[in-house]
Amino acid sequence: MDVAVSMPRAADLLAWYDRHRRALPWRAGVGERPDPYRVWASEIMLQQTTVTAVKPYYERFMARFPTVAALAAAPSEDVMQAWAGLGYYSRARNLHACAKAVMELNGGRFPDNEEGLRALPGIGAYTAGAVAAIAFGRPAAAVDGNVERVMTRLFAIADELPGARPLIRDKVLTLLPHDRPGDFAQALMDLGATICTPRNPACGLCPWREPCQAREEGTQESFPRKAPKKAGQTRYGAAFVLTRADGAILLRTRPAKGLLGGMAEVPTSEWRADYELDGAAQDAPLALRWTQVAQPVRHVFTHFPLELTVFTGSVPTPTPAPPGMRFTPLADLAGEPLPSVMLKVVERAGLFRIGPKSGVHL
DNA sequence: CAAGCGTGGCG
DNA sequence: TCGCCAAGCTT
């Protein structure tokens, strides 16, 4: 059906942005020149991650790695530790690889265009556009989940994602103001995050309420359309928290790639849908008397739920770590790159109290 | 192109 | 409690 709405104008969005822009740690002040390193690092952290979750990580990360040179020179374990708890750990591995590449290729200077950025590890279509626009003022489209939502509503695009993405990109490029591409990109994201929200959008406050086709039809909450995801099957396993008499815990490092790649963990069995707890002792790192903790740890990954039954055990001080494993003093536990699921396991073992964000208290 | 890849917050 | 999902990328 035809709808009697006008074309949206970038100027209306930018005027709204000038009054309502969020003050964010990685965002340059009005008139300030953005630091490409900070823009890039924040964009990587923000991939599939909320602003609230990113803020404290970003602050710590910048204090610890103030420049791309500092990041490139850091040991990978330090980078993984700084990322621990934030999730999607391939981002941290790619971030580190990207920093090294930027040092090698351009002596620490980021490429100032989409194509050059897109060639770097961890930088895809969205991030290349975002950094090109925000850090370098290039007329690039940065299409993320916010922009998908805003554009599909604005133009009532009923095609399912991700198929509709090229069309969405075209719409953004059509609207893009060549004098303020960086502000436009950020304005679109602020609009999506604060006004054009997934549920209960505040259409009455939207600078584009007049030209919005979905609002005209009253169908705004039905956009964007996307195929439903199938839920993964729950996997089960056993986790072994072994303490030595001198106050050290047995850990190992996961393989570099795949789930929680490069992160630290306590030894566990395989995680399988048909795991039999009766045989858990055979999966233990050492043969000894293990005590089963009553309540298992539940954790939900993106593609499957996990239920780990925790076993505790102790050994005398001269005990060496089995091959491929290590004993870490409790005092150093906070320095380990432990993902959230492993913090839950260690906490469930009842040996320590662990605060939020890897804060370990004895 | 679909699947793999974390986590915490919110309705 | 539970499903949804947030500034996506890689293979």
Image: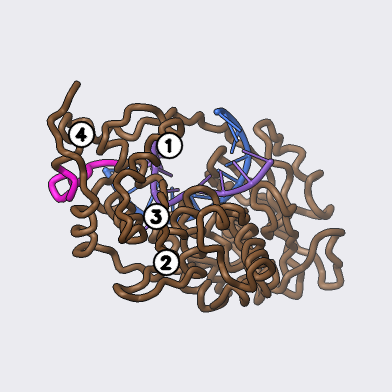
Chain colours: A brown, B blue, C purple
Distance from disc 3 to disc 4, alpha carbons, whole Å, reads 25 Å
- Are the residues tagged 1 and 2 within 8 Å (C-beta)? no
In this picture, residue A5 sits left or right of residue A44: left
Confirm whether residue A282 shows in the render.
Answer: yes
Q: Earlier in the sequence, mark 3 or mark 1?
A: 3
Q: Is residue A80 magenta?
A: no
Distance from disc 4 to disc 2, alpha carbons, whole Å, reads 34 Å
| SS for dot 2 | helix
According to the picture, the residue beneath numbered tag 1 turns out to be A165
Q: Are marks 4 and 2 on the same chain?
A: yes
Q: Main secondary structure of the magenta part?
A: loop
Residue A139, numbered circle: 3
Residue A213, numbered circle: 4
Name the residue furthest front. Answer: A178
| SS for dot 4 | helix
According to the picture, the residue beneath numbered tag 2 turns out to be A55
- Horizontal and vertical percent for residue A27? 37, 68
| SS for dot 3 | loop
Q: Looking at the image, which residue is at 44% across and 56% down?
A: A130
As rendered, which of A78 and B11 lies closer to the eye? A78
- Are the residues tagged 3 and 4 within 8 Å (C-beta)? no
In this picture, residue A146 sits left or right of residue A56: left
Q: Which chain does the residue under circle 2 lie in?
A: A
- Horizontal and vertical percent for residue B7? 51, 54
Whether A60 is drawn above or below A214: the answer is below
- Residue A321 location, quadrant: bottom right
As rendered, which of A107 and A28 lies closer to the eye? A107
